Image: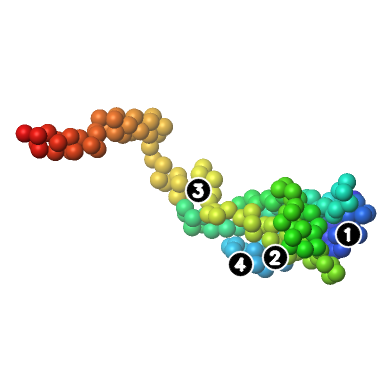
Amino acid sequence: MIIGQLPKVFDPRKLARQGKQFEGSLALEQFGQLVDSLADDKGEVKVSLHFYMSEDHRVILEGSVSATLKMICQRCLDVAGIPVTADLRLMGVLTDEQARALPEDFDPLMMGEEPVELVPLLEEELLLALPIVAYHPPEDCPAQRSFTTESEEEAQAFAEQVEEERKGSNPFSVLAELKTDTTN
């Protein structure tokens, strides 16, 4: 296993035949498109990769990429550290047709004559793993705490009162009254 320096570009076939594994980290600022979605570009991205050949001699890349990304909390509009992890399970393909025929649990890794660039591959996986809307955990969010003023008992009592009112009122009672008016 190689620890530390991750390759900038790699030949998936060669690394899979050698059964190479890599662990290391990259500076977050290298991920330009991802950084555009964040509050700042400080931090690091942790990477763990394992290349191997499947039983039917196909290139497999498994691993994970994770980072704590600084995003704007949509409750309080303050910066929140959001942990993001993407698991990689890629199988090498040469054509779009091969990519469509992959087993469900694999994503395609397009291989050509050119080596594969590591950062764009990892960046795509992180972008797909970003939350649609970023929030602090409720207990850490200042806005959430300021709006949660009632106790559990008060909230439960209010929910029960609303439920009783809902059961007591029938939205079709007006129609029933109209029906009795027309028959008279």
Q: How crowded is mark 4: few (under 14 residues within 10 Å), some or many (20 or more)?
A: few
Labels 2 & 3 near each other (Cβ < 8 A): no
Q: Earlier in the sequence, mark 2 or mark 3?
A: 2
Q: Which residue is depicted at the point 54% across and 58% down? A: 72
Q: In which quarter of the image is residue 30?
A: bottom right
Q: Which of 89 and 104 is in front in this view?
A: 104
* Residue 141 numbered tag: 3
Of badges 1 and 3, the one in the foreground is 1
Q: Which of marks 3 and 4 is nearer the N terminus?
A: 4
Q: On screen, 110 above or below 104?
A: below
Disc 4 secondary structure class: loop
The colouring scheme, among rainbow, by chain, secondary structure or one colour, is rainbow
Whether residue 79 is visible here, answered yes or no, is: no
- For the residues marked 1 and 2, what is the alpha-carbon distance in whole angstroms? 25 Å
Q: Which of marks 4 and 1 is nearer the N terminus?
A: 1
Q: Which amino acid does label 3 sit on?
A: Cys
Disc 1 secondary structure class: helix
Q: Name the residue under label 1.
A: 13
Q: In which quarter of the image is residue 79?
A: bottom right
Q: On screen, 28 above or below 50?
A: below
Q: Which amino acid does label 1 sit on?
A: Arg
- For the residues marked 4 and 1, what is the alpha-carbon distance in whole angstroms? 32 Å
Q: Nearer the viewer, residue 91 or 96?
A: 96
Q: Which residue is depicted at the point 40% across and 45% down? A: 147
- For the residues marked 3 and 4, what is the alpha-carbon distance in whole angstroms? 23 Å
Q: Which residue is depicted at the point 49% across and 57% down? A: 77
Q: Name the residue under label 4.
A: 36
Q: Quadrant of residue 26?
A: bottom right
Q: Name the residue under label 2.
A: 31
- For the residues marked 2 and 3, what is the alpha-carbon distance in whole angstroms? 27 Å
Instruction: Pick the quarter of the image with the C terminus.
Output: top left
Q: Which of marks 1 and 2 is nearer the N terminus?
A: 1
